[in-house]
Amino acid sequence: MKRCITLALGTSLALLLTACGDDQSAEYKEGADAETMASAMKPPSVPASERVDVSYETGEEIFTHYCVQCHGEGEGKPGATMLGIKHGEDKAIIKGRDDLPAIYIKTVVRDGLLEMPPFRFTEISDEQLDLVAEYVRSPN
Amino acid sequence: MATTLPEGVSSSDFDQAIREIRKIVGDEWVFLDSELSPYLDHMSAVPPEYRTPSAALAPANVEETQAILKIANRFSLPLWTYGNGKNWAYGGPTPLHAGYLVLDLKRMNRILEVNEDSGYVLVEPGVSYFQLYQHLQDIGSNLWIDCAAPGWGGVIGNALEHGAGYTPYADHYVMSCGMEVLLADGELVRTGMGAMPGSKAWQQFKYGYGPTLDGMFTQGNFGIVTKMGFWMMPKPPAYKPFMFSYEKESDLHAIMEILRPLKMNMVWQNGAVGEHIGYSASVLGPRSDYTDSSAPITDARWQEIAHDLNLGIWNFYGACYGLPANVEMQFGALKGAMTSIPGARVWLEGDREPDDAGWNYRAKLMQGIPNMTEFNLVNWDGGGHLNFSPMGPMGGDHAVKLYNMMKEITNGYGFDHLTEMVGTFRGFIALTMVMFDPRDEDAAKRADACSVDIIQKAAAAGYGELKANLRYMNTVMGSYTGNDSGLHKVNQKIKDALDPVGILSPGKSDIWPSSWKHSRAN
């Protein structure tokens, strides 16, 4: 059975909202809500943490932090999408592409290329960039 | 690349200053000449070389920054400051004028505190959303972050630019609590409760005692924010993302009328993000996926695209948060109101295809999971993009007026109209994107002229701009001229008092010290 709730909201007298849900969602259940509330408000199990310094040491770590959100697998990756359109689906994912010379990878990262913006030395150092290029070119 | 000197600074003074700065930060953190390539903006309407800095400096901490400020004061060096430098639609890491020195705070990237009891974090300017999110995941935190759409953005930088996210904590400046700020003379200030030695509530209460200064350190150049606290939303027991889609362009009026009381009464808890189909399509693929024509995409073609993508002409994303029963009741109210428009459709988790990038990234953002999917829109037409955000009061008449105005302007300059309407508590932002190929000189010129037109026509109709690419800061501030330019005058008085030489980001938001004798036009 459906239950309908009508709410008149605030300053807009003209707007009447009709909310239709099932009994379970629309009805106020004191016991269940109290239990959920208690669970949500329980003391945190994680203590306060202080001062975290960041350093990404391996090519994979650096790639994962800076590159994979645009160049990784799966939908919604701008870099992979564009490379796939321009050069074919087999070129979409840069990880494992040994046809990309290391110097090319490093130049694109530093100078940017069309839709890809450049990355600064304060984001990825030269030493880290060497590791990234090596990681990108390494077999999957 | 030949060194471009700051205006009015001799080559010998510049060299001496650089020698001294090297001793402070170390040789490897001073960048000159060809090393400045990553500090150029390839995505705006002027060539990258237009704003070549003279140097980039990367201090590791407050003390090194203070030492740099002393030298900058002595040699009158203009420093252009930022943390992450990823706001590409607005200039990225490039300075307002060629010759400025970039003060790159990315190395100051420490997460100083995560407090689960009070639900806040204290961070430095180089901390990105990705970094903060990953850290909270690593320690098993119960706190959500609220991030901008591109997750590489800076937590502090975005808040200082009045940026927003997608959870109920979306207004990042509003959700900040407590700053540490370096002034141009090297003085270090903590705002709010942080001004008291041994304060126990710097990140719990904003005001402290006396005037509240935090706002004047945003979107300006009165200080360098070196630490900032942010309230973080505890993970709610229930989260329900949704999308309402609408068939007709003309539905916008009714949508915004219905949305207004929902937002005012906080029934719609987070930002109501209403994508026009053009915006939705741009996140899914480049322009060439949708048309072979160089002319702006027509209304009829947008209808076909909406049909093909199984979306509406308008697609409004939001989410409910809280206790499970409350979430269901709240969603019922939203559904009842938002589907009262004929043709409206409701989309929930599992209704879209599993690989629908549009739904997936919105569902992540609305629970504070950073990603880069929205940056796909940069692929639309060659990478050039300029964002504009004229602000109007929430309501049908204003929304339709601004939408039509922006559409007419962008189409008139030969660009597609890519927009999303973002409903805040009382107003809405008509986010308008000008997308172009920067390699096409004619397109870049049209984008430049289009940008000025957008700002000026919106302002003439009473809709002010919230933020601006470097090139248009003076155009925007030039529209805030009420009371004989009273706001501009008080900004200048503050600048004169705090930074009379003009070493901190001179010209940011068109704020200059009165003694400034160098270029202002950009």
Image (cartoon, coloured by chain):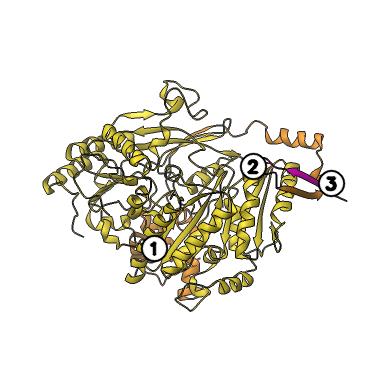
Q: Residues within 10 Å of mark 1 (few under 14, many from 20)?
A: many
Q: Residues within 10 Å of mark 2 (few under 14, many from 20)?
A: few
User: Badge 3 sits on which subunit?
Assistant: A
Residue B350 in sight = no
Q: Colour of chain A?
A: orange
Residue B341 in sight = yes
On the image, numbered disc 1 is attached to which residue? B450
Compute the Cα span from label 1 to label 3: 54 Å
On the image, numbered disc 3 is attached to which residue? A23
Q: Position of residue B77 (x, y in %)?
A: 21, 43
Residue A94 in the image: above or below residue B118: below
Foreground: B186 or B212? B212
On the image, numbered disc 2 is attached to which residue? B266
User: Badge 2 sits on which subunit?
Assistant: B
Residue at 20 percent of width and 47 percent of height: B518
Residue at 62 percent of width and 42 percent of height: B264
Q: Residues within 10 Å of mark 3 (few under 14, many from 20)?
A: few
Residues in magenta, as a range: A3-14
Q: Colour of chain B?
A: yellow
- The quarter of the rendered structure image containing the N terminus of chain B is bottom left
Question: Please, what secondary structure does the residue beneath circle 3 have?
Answer: helix
Question: Please, what secondary structure does the residue beneath circle 2 have?
Answer: loop
Q: Position of residue B353 (x, y in %)?
A: 66, 65
